[in-house]
Amino acid sequence: MLALRAVIAGVGFGSLAIAAAGASPAAREYVPDLVQSKQAEAERADSPGACFAAGPSGRPGAVVDCKHEHVFELAASINLNDYPGSAFTSSAYPDQKRIAAWNQQLCEPAVSAYLGERLDSLGRFKVGSLLSGEKAWARGEHVLRCGLEMPGGSHKLLVFTGKVADQDQSLTYDTGVCVGAERNMPTDPVDCSQPHAFEIVGQADLAAQFPGRADANPPSEDEQNDKLKDLCEKAAESYLGNADHLRDTTLDVNWTILKPQSWLVGSRKAVCFLAKHNDQGFAVLGGSVKGSLLVDGAKPVPPPKPTRSTSVPIAPPGRPRE
Protein backbone atom coordinates (compact mmCIF):
# COMPACT_ATOMS: atom_id res chain seq x y z
CA MET A 1 0.00 0.00 0.00
CA LEU A 2 2.67 2.74 -0.97
CA ALA A 3 3.82 5.52 1.39
CA LEU A 4 0.61 6.98 2.62
CA ARG A 5 -0.70 8.60 5.78
CA ALA A 6 -3.49 6.45 7.24
CA VAL A 7 -5.86 6.61 10.17
CA ILE A 8 -7.32 3.24 11.11
CA ALA A 9 -10.72 2.78 12.70
CA GLY A 10 -11.90 -0.64 13.87
CA VAL A 11 -15.13 -2.00 12.41
CA GLY A 12 -15.15 -5.49 13.83
CA PHE A 13 -12.81 -8.24 14.94
CA GLY A 14 -10.04 -8.84 12.48
CA SER A 15 -11.09 -6.20 9.98
CA LEU A 16 -10.24 -2.55 9.73
CA ALA A 17 -11.37 0.29 7.54
CA ILE A 18 -8.53 2.48 6.33
CA ALA A 19 -9.17 6.10 5.47
CA ALA A 20 -6.46 8.48 4.43
CA ALA A 21 -6.08 11.28 6.91
CA GLY A 22 -6.70 14.36 4.88
CA ALA A 23 -9.46 13.03 2.68
CA SER A 24 -10.66 16.60 2.95
CA PRO A 25 -7.94 19.29 2.85
CA ALA A 26 -9.98 21.32 5.31
CA ALA A 27 -9.52 18.53 7.86
CA ARG A 28 -5.72 18.64 7.81
CA GLU A 29 -2.90 21.12 7.68
CA TYR A 30 -2.62 21.71 3.95
CA VAL A 31 0.79 22.43 2.45
CA PRO A 32 0.58 23.21 -1.28
CA ASP A 33 3.25 22.49 -3.84
CA LEU A 34 4.65 25.92 -4.66
CA VAL A 35 6.27 26.38 -8.05
CA GLN A 36 9.54 28.20 -7.40
CA SER A 37 11.51 27.52 -10.58
CA LYS A 38 11.01 29.63 -13.71
CA GLN A 39 12.18 26.72 -15.79
CA ALA A 40 9.69 24.38 -14.16
CA GLU A 41 6.93 26.94 -14.68
CA ALA A 42 7.85 27.27 -18.34
CA GLU A 43 7.71 23.51 -18.82
CA ARG A 44 4.31 23.07 -17.27
CA ALA A 45 1.45 22.30 -19.59
CA ASP A 46 -2.00 23.71 -18.96
CA SER A 47 -3.78 20.83 -20.69
CA PRO A 48 -5.83 18.58 -18.38
CA GLY A 49 -4.22 15.17 -18.15
CA ALA A 50 -0.63 16.41 -18.23
CA CYS A 51 1.68 14.55 -15.84
CA PHE A 52 4.69 16.01 -14.03
CA ALA A 53 7.74 14.12 -12.83
CA ALA A 54 9.39 14.90 -9.52
CA GLY A 55 11.78 17.83 -9.62
CA PRO A 56 15.04 18.13 -7.64
CA SER A 57 13.12 18.93 -4.45
CA GLY A 58 10.63 16.12 -4.96
CA ARG A 59 7.95 18.57 -6.01
CA PRO A 60 6.37 18.49 -9.51
CA GLY A 61 8.87 19.44 -12.22
CA ALA A 62 9.01 18.63 -15.93
CA VAL A 63 6.12 17.30 -17.98
CA VAL A 64 6.44 13.59 -18.83
CA ASP A 65 4.40 10.91 -20.52
CA CYS A 66 1.96 9.59 -17.92
CA LYS A 67 3.20 6.03 -18.47
CA HIS A 68 6.41 7.12 -16.73
CA GLU A 69 6.79 7.85 -13.03
CA HIS A 70 5.27 11.15 -11.98
CA VAL A 71 3.97 12.90 -8.88
CA PHE A 72 1.16 15.11 -10.22
CA GLU A 73 -1.62 14.74 -12.79
CA LEU A 74 -3.19 18.01 -13.93
CA ALA A 75 -6.97 18.29 -13.85
CA ALA A 76 -7.44 22.01 -14.50
CA SER A 77 -5.47 25.24 -14.77
CA ILE A 78 -7.28 28.21 -13.24
CA ASN A 79 -6.40 31.85 -13.90
CA LEU A 80 -7.20 33.52 -10.60
CA ASN A 81 -7.18 36.94 -12.26
CA ASP A 82 -10.54 35.98 -13.76
CA TYR A 83 -12.10 35.96 -10.29
CA PRO A 84 -13.37 39.14 -8.63
CA GLY A 85 -11.85 40.29 -5.36
CA SER A 86 -8.50 41.57 -4.18
CA ALA A 87 -7.52 38.18 -2.76
CA PHE A 88 -7.15 36.86 -6.31
CA THR A 89 -5.54 39.91 -7.91
CA SER A 90 -3.44 41.43 -5.12
CA SER A 91 0.32 41.53 -5.69
CA ALA A 92 0.80 40.25 -2.13
CA TYR A 93 1.49 36.54 -2.15
CA PRO A 94 -1.37 34.55 -0.54
CA ASP A 95 -0.80 32.89 2.80
CA GLN A 96 -1.20 29.18 3.53
CA LYS A 97 -4.72 29.59 4.86
CA ARG A 98 -5.83 31.30 1.65
CA ILE A 99 -4.19 28.67 -0.55
CA ALA A 100 -5.82 25.87 1.45
CA ALA A 101 -9.20 27.51 0.95
CA TRP A 102 -8.64 27.73 -2.81
CA ASN A 103 -7.60 24.09 -2.89
CA GLN A 104 -10.91 23.15 -1.30
CA GLN A 105 -13.17 25.65 -3.04
CA LEU A 106 -11.66 25.59 -6.54
CA CYS A 107 -9.58 22.46 -6.94
CA GLU A 108 -11.87 19.87 -5.39
CA PRO A 109 -14.73 20.62 -7.82
CA ALA A 110 -12.29 20.81 -10.75
CA VAL A 111 -10.75 17.42 -9.95
CA SER A 112 -14.16 15.86 -9.35
CA ALA A 113 -15.33 17.05 -12.77
CA TYR A 114 -12.09 15.85 -14.40
CA LEU A 115 -12.61 12.32 -13.06
CA GLY A 116 -16.33 12.28 -13.74
CA GLU A 117 -17.18 12.19 -10.02
CA ARG A 118 -15.07 9.04 -9.56
CA LEU A 119 -12.44 10.07 -7.02
CA ASP A 120 -12.14 7.69 -4.07
CA SER A 121 -11.87 10.14 -1.18
CA LEU A 122 -10.71 7.25 1.05
CA GLY A 123 -8.14 6.04 -1.48
CA ARG A 124 -4.51 6.77 -2.20
CA PHE A 125 -4.94 9.84 -4.41
CA LYS A 126 -5.67 13.32 -3.07
CA VAL A 127 -6.55 16.68 -4.53
CA GLY A 128 -3.44 18.85 -4.77
CA SER A 129 -2.56 22.25 -6.17
CA LEU A 130 0.37 24.06 -7.75
CA LEU A 131 0.42 27.82 -7.31
CA SER A 132 2.53 30.28 -9.28
CA GLY A 133 5.75 31.10 -7.45
CA GLU A 134 6.20 34.37 -5.60
CA LYS A 135 8.15 36.08 -8.40
CA ALA A 136 5.63 35.01 -11.03
CA TRP A 137 2.81 36.11 -8.74
CA ALA A 138 4.39 39.55 -8.37
CA ARG A 139 4.47 39.81 -12.19
CA GLY A 140 0.73 39.19 -12.28
CA GLU A 141 0.80 35.48 -13.15
CA HIS A 142 -1.84 34.22 -10.74
CA VAL A 143 -2.34 30.62 -11.83
CA LEU A 144 -3.65 27.77 -9.70
CA ARG A 145 -3.14 24.32 -11.19
CA CYS A 146 -5.38 21.66 -9.70
CA GLY A 147 -4.67 17.98 -9.91
CA LEU A 148 -4.09 14.62 -8.28
CA GLU A 149 -1.15 13.51 -6.19
CA MET A 150 -0.21 10.72 -3.82
CA PRO A 151 0.92 12.17 -0.47
CA GLY A 152 3.58 10.51 1.62
CA GLY A 153 5.07 11.41 4.97
CA SER A 154 6.51 14.83 5.85
CA HIS A 155 4.62 16.46 2.97
CA LYS A 156 6.51 14.37 0.41
CA LEU A 157 4.86 13.19 -2.78
CA LEU A 158 5.03 9.59 -3.95
CA VAL A 159 5.51 8.60 -7.55
CA PHE A 160 2.91 6.70 -9.53
CA THR A 161 2.46 5.64 -13.14
CA GLY A 162 -0.52 5.86 -15.47
CA LYS A 163 -3.63 8.01 -15.36
CA VAL A 164 -5.62 7.95 -12.14
CA ALA A 165 -8.86 7.24 -14.02
CA ASP A 166 -7.37 4.03 -15.41
CA GLN A 167 -6.37 2.40 -12.13
CA ASP A 168 -7.73 1.08 -8.88
CA GLN A 169 -7.58 3.87 -6.30
CA SER A 170 -7.64 1.63 -3.22
CA LEU A 171 -5.25 2.55 -0.42
CA THR A 172 -2.88 -0.41 -0.44
CA TYR A 173 0.68 -1.42 0.49
CA ASP A 174 3.06 -4.00 -0.95
CA THR A 175 3.65 -7.28 0.87
CA GLY A 176 6.47 -6.97 3.39
CA VAL A 177 5.95 -3.25 4.00
CA CYS A 178 5.91 -2.09 7.62
CA VAL A 179 3.79 0.94 8.47
CA GLY A 180 5.11 3.24 11.17
CA ALA A 181 3.48 4.10 14.48
CA GLU A 182 3.07 7.40 16.27
CA ARG A 183 1.06 7.64 19.49
CA ASN A 184 -0.10 4.06 18.90
CA MET A 185 -1.58 4.89 15.48
CA PRO A 186 -0.25 4.06 11.97
CA THR A 187 1.61 6.69 9.96
CA ASP A 188 3.76 5.97 6.88
CA PRO A 189 5.80 3.01 5.64
CA VAL A 190 9.16 2.64 7.39
CA ASP A 191 12.00 0.16 7.47
CA CYS A 192 10.82 -2.78 9.57
CA SER A 193 13.71 -2.22 11.97
CA GLN A 194 12.01 1.03 12.98
CA PRO A 195 8.98 1.22 15.33
CA HIS A 196 5.84 0.38 13.40
CA ALA A 197 2.19 -0.54 13.84
CA PHE A 198 1.78 -3.40 11.41
CA GLU A 199 3.38 -5.47 8.66
CA ILE A 200 1.67 -6.28 5.36
CA VAL A 201 1.43 -9.99 4.56
CA GLY A 202 -0.68 -9.97 1.39
CA GLN A 203 -3.35 -8.40 -0.77
CA ALA A 204 -6.83 -9.42 -1.83
CA ASP A 205 -8.76 -8.60 -4.99
CA LEU A 206 -12.37 -8.18 -3.94
CA ALA A 207 -13.47 -8.08 -7.57
CA ALA A 208 -12.50 -11.76 -7.75
CA GLN A 209 -14.30 -12.49 -4.48
CA PHE A 210 -17.49 -10.79 -5.65
CA PRO A 211 -17.55 -11.40 -9.41
CA GLY A 212 -20.09 -9.42 -11.35
CA ARG A 213 -20.88 -7.18 -8.38
CA ALA A 214 -21.97 -3.80 -9.72
CA ASP A 215 -20.53 -0.50 -8.50
CA ALA A 216 -23.92 0.39 -7.07
CA ASN A 217 -24.14 -2.89 -5.13
CA PRO A 218 -21.17 -2.91 -2.73
CA PRO A 219 -20.63 -5.92 -0.47
CA SER A 220 -21.39 -5.32 3.18
CA GLU A 221 -18.70 -5.34 5.85
CA ASP A 222 -19.91 -8.75 7.01
CA GLU A 223 -19.68 -10.13 3.47
CA GLN A 224 -16.15 -8.80 3.10
CA ASN A 225 -15.16 -10.15 6.51
CA ASP A 226 -16.43 -13.61 5.59
CA LYS A 227 -14.25 -13.65 2.48
CA LEU A 228 -11.17 -11.97 3.90
CA LYS A 229 -10.89 -13.91 7.16
CA ASP A 230 -9.75 -17.12 5.49
CA LEU A 231 -7.86 -15.35 2.72
CA CYS A 232 -5.81 -13.28 5.14
CA GLU A 233 -5.13 -16.13 7.54
CA LYS A 234 -3.78 -18.17 4.63
CA ALA A 235 -1.77 -15.18 3.40
CA ALA A 236 -0.23 -14.73 6.85
CA GLU A 237 0.65 -18.41 7.17
CA SER A 238 2.18 -18.39 3.69
CA TYR A 239 4.16 -15.24 4.47
CA LEU A 240 5.60 -16.77 7.64
CA GLY A 241 5.94 -20.31 6.36
CA ASN A 242 3.33 -22.08 8.47
CA ALA A 243 0.63 -21.66 11.10
CA ASP A 244 3.02 -22.32 14.01
CA HIS A 245 5.24 -19.41 13.06
CA LEU A 246 2.18 -17.19 12.81
CA ARG A 247 1.03 -18.30 16.25
CA ASP A 248 4.47 -17.61 17.73
CA THR A 249 4.29 -13.94 16.76
CA THR A 250 1.24 -13.49 19.06
CA LEU A 251 -0.02 -10.93 16.51
CA ASP A 252 -3.54 -10.69 15.17
CA VAL A 253 -4.42 -11.27 11.52
CA ASN A 254 -6.17 -8.16 10.23
CA TRP A 255 -7.46 -6.88 6.92
CA THR A 256 -8.89 -3.73 5.42
CA ILE A 257 -12.41 -3.39 4.13
CA LEU A 258 -13.84 -1.12 1.47
CA LYS A 259 -16.47 1.44 2.31
CA PRO A 260 -19.48 1.76 -0.05
CA GLN A 261 -18.23 5.09 -1.42
CA SER A 262 -14.96 3.45 -2.43
CA TRP A 263 -16.66 0.50 -4.11
CA LEU A 264 -18.98 2.90 -5.94
CA VAL A 265 -16.06 4.50 -7.82
CA GLY A 266 -14.30 1.23 -8.65
CA SER A 267 -11.90 0.53 -5.77
CA ARG A 268 -11.56 -3.22 -5.24
CA LYS A 269 -8.32 -3.93 -3.34
CA ALA A 270 -7.79 -4.90 0.30
CA VAL A 271 -4.67 -5.78 2.25
CA CYS A 272 -3.89 -8.33 4.95
CA PHE A 273 -1.57 -7.40 7.80
CA LEU A 274 -0.33 -8.46 11.22
CA ALA A 275 -0.71 -6.19 14.23
CA LYS A 276 -1.33 -6.25 17.96
CA HIS A 277 -4.12 -4.16 19.44
CA ASN A 278 -4.14 -2.53 22.85
CA ASP A 279 -6.26 0.01 24.71
CA GLN A 280 -4.45 2.90 23.01
CA GLY A 281 -4.75 1.54 19.49
CA PHE A 282 -1.83 -0.48 18.17
CA ALA A 283 1.10 -2.00 20.02
CA VAL A 284 4.46 -0.76 18.74
CA LEU A 285 6.35 -3.44 16.84
CA GLY A 286 10.09 -3.62 16.27
CA GLY A 287 11.66 -5.82 13.63
CA SER A 288 9.97 -7.93 10.99
CA VAL A 289 7.67 -10.78 11.92
CA LYS A 290 10.10 -12.92 9.91
CA GLY A 291 12.99 -12.05 12.23
CA SER A 292 13.59 -10.83 15.77
CA LEU A 293 10.19 -9.34 16.52
CA LEU A 294 9.53 -7.12 19.54
CA VAL A 295 6.05 -6.18 20.72
CA ASP A 296 6.03 -3.02 22.85
CA GLY A 297 9.75 -3.56 23.41
CA ALA A 298 9.53 -7.19 24.54
CA LYS A 299 9.92 -10.52 22.81
CA PRO A 300 6.52 -12.12 22.22
CA VAL A 301 5.67 -15.06 24.44
CA PRO A 302 3.68 -17.61 22.44
CA PRO A 303 0.67 -19.12 24.20
CA PRO A 304 0.84 -22.82 25.09
CA LYS A 305 0.09 -25.02 22.14
CA PRO A 306 -3.47 -26.30 22.30
CA THR A 307 -3.65 -29.96 23.26
CA ARG A 308 -6.51 -32.40 23.09
CA SER A 309 -7.82 -33.33 26.55
CA THR A 310 -8.02 -37.02 27.43
CA SER A 311 -9.95 -36.59 30.66
CA VAL A 312 -12.98 -34.74 29.31
CA PRO A 313 -14.85 -36.01 26.25
CA ILE A 314 -14.86 -33.67 23.27
CA ALA A 315 -18.41 -32.76 22.24
CA PRO A 316 -19.06 -33.36 18.54
CA PRO A 317 -19.90 -30.30 16.43
CA GLY A 318 -23.42 -29.05 16.98
CA ARG A 319 -24.05 -31.04 20.17
CA PRO A 320 -23.74 -29.31 23.57
CA ARG A 321 -21.44 -30.88 26.12
CA GLU A 322 -23.37 -32.64 28.90
Image (cartoon, rainbow, N blue to C red):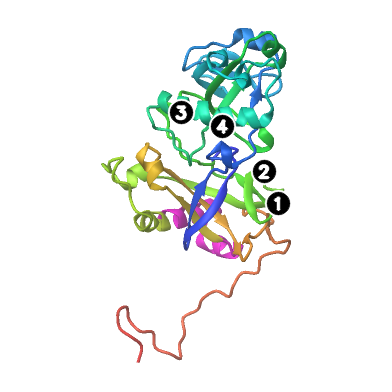
* In the foreground, 125 or 255: 125
Q: Which residue is mark 1?
A: 195
Residue 236 is covered by the magenta coloring: yes
Residue at figure coordinates x 65%, y 9% from the top left: 140
* In the foreground, 160 or 39: 39
Which comes sooner in the sequence, label 1 or label 4?
Answer: 4
Q: Which residue is mark 2?
A: 190
Instruction: Name the dominant secondary structure of the magenta segment.
Output: helix
Q: Nearer the viewer, mark 1 or mark 4?
A: 4
Q: Nearer the viewer, mark 4 or mark 3?
A: 3
- In the picture, the disc for residue 109 is 3
Q: Is residue 296 above or below residue 203?
A: below
Residue at figure coordinates x 71%, y 18% from the top left: 92
| Cα–Cα span, label 2 and label 1 | 8 Å
* In the foreground, 275 or 266: 266
| Cα–Cα span, label 4 and label 3 | 18 Å
Residue type at mark 4? Met
Mark 2 is surrounded, within 10 Å at the Cα level, by few (under 14), some (14 to 19) or many (20 or more) other residues, namely some
Q: In which quadrant of the rendered image does the N terminus lie?
A: top right
- In the picture, the disc for residue 150 is 4
What x and y, as percent, mark residue 119? 43, 33
Residue type at mark 1? Pro
Which comes sooner in the sequence, label 2 or label 3?
Answer: 3
Q: Secondary structure at mark 2?
A: strand
Q: Is residue 100 above or below residue 23?
A: above
Q: Secondary structure at mark 3?
A: helix
Q: Secondary structure at mark 1?
A: loop
Mark 1 is surrounded, within 10 Å at the Cα level, by few (under 14), some (14 to 19) or many (20 or more) other residues, namely many
What x and y, as percent, mark residue 48? 47, 16
What segment carries the magenta color?
231-251
